[in-house]
Image (tube, rainbow, N blue to C red):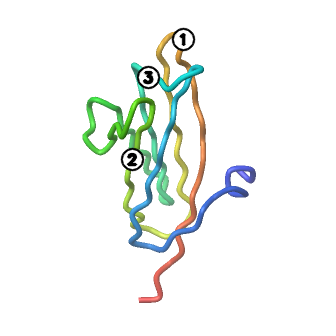
Amino acid sequence: MTDLLATAHTYDEGDLVSITAEFTKGVAIDPTALSIAVKSPNGTVTTYVYGTNAELVREALGRFRLDVLATAEGYWYYRIASAAAGEQAAEERAFIVRPSVF
């Protein structure tokens, strides 16, 4: 977990955090099976699947975005994954949400 936090961006509570994913195989490709799992500071994991959840959008060939509302202070983690044959890829990252003083 320490490595994830070393590169984590910091946001304020109430910010809309954009999680982006890009897929290439020499050139940009759209994976046939894409999901992004988000773990909030209270431990709740929500998984978004492209083609099922409207929140996970395709911006361009091989580029996807998920906007997450930072509703709680603390450490947030996410995992981007494609499990289709020949397209297996996964990456985990984190972001930090500062508490509001209001």
Dot 1 amino acid type: Gly
Please report whichever mark, 3 or 2, sits nearer to the chain's N-terminal start. 3
Task: Assess disc 2: are there few (<14), some (14-19) or many (≥20) residues with their C-alpha within 10 Å of its C-alpha.
Answer: many
* Real-space Cα separation, disc 3 to disc 1, in angstroms: 9 Å
Q: How many numbered dots are placed on residues in this image?
A: 3
Q: What's under tag 2, amino acid-wise?
A: Leu
Tell me what residue is drawn at x 39 percent, y 39 percent.
Answer: 47
Mark 3 vs mark 2, CA separation in Å: 15 Å
Q: Which residue is mark 2?
A: 66
Numbered disc 1: secondary structure? loop
Residue found at the far top of this picture: 85
**Three-letter code for the amino acid on which mark 3 is drawn:** Pro
Separation of marks 2 and 1 at Cα, in angstroms: 24 Å
Q: Nearer the viewer, residue 3 or 57?
A: 57
Position of residue 4 measured from the top left corner of the image (x, y, whole percent): 68, 50
Q: Residues within 10 Å of mark 3 (few under 14, many from 20)?
A: many
The residue that disc 3 covers is 31
Q: Is residue 72 left or right of residue 27?
A: left
Residue 86 tag number? 1
> x and y percent of residue 79 in the render?
53, 40
Taking the spot 32% from the left edge, 40% from the top edge, the residue there is 57
Q: Quadrant of residue 49?
A: top left
Between discs 3 and 1, the one toward the N terminus: 3
Whichever of callouts 2 and 1 sits on the residue coming sooner in the sequence is 2
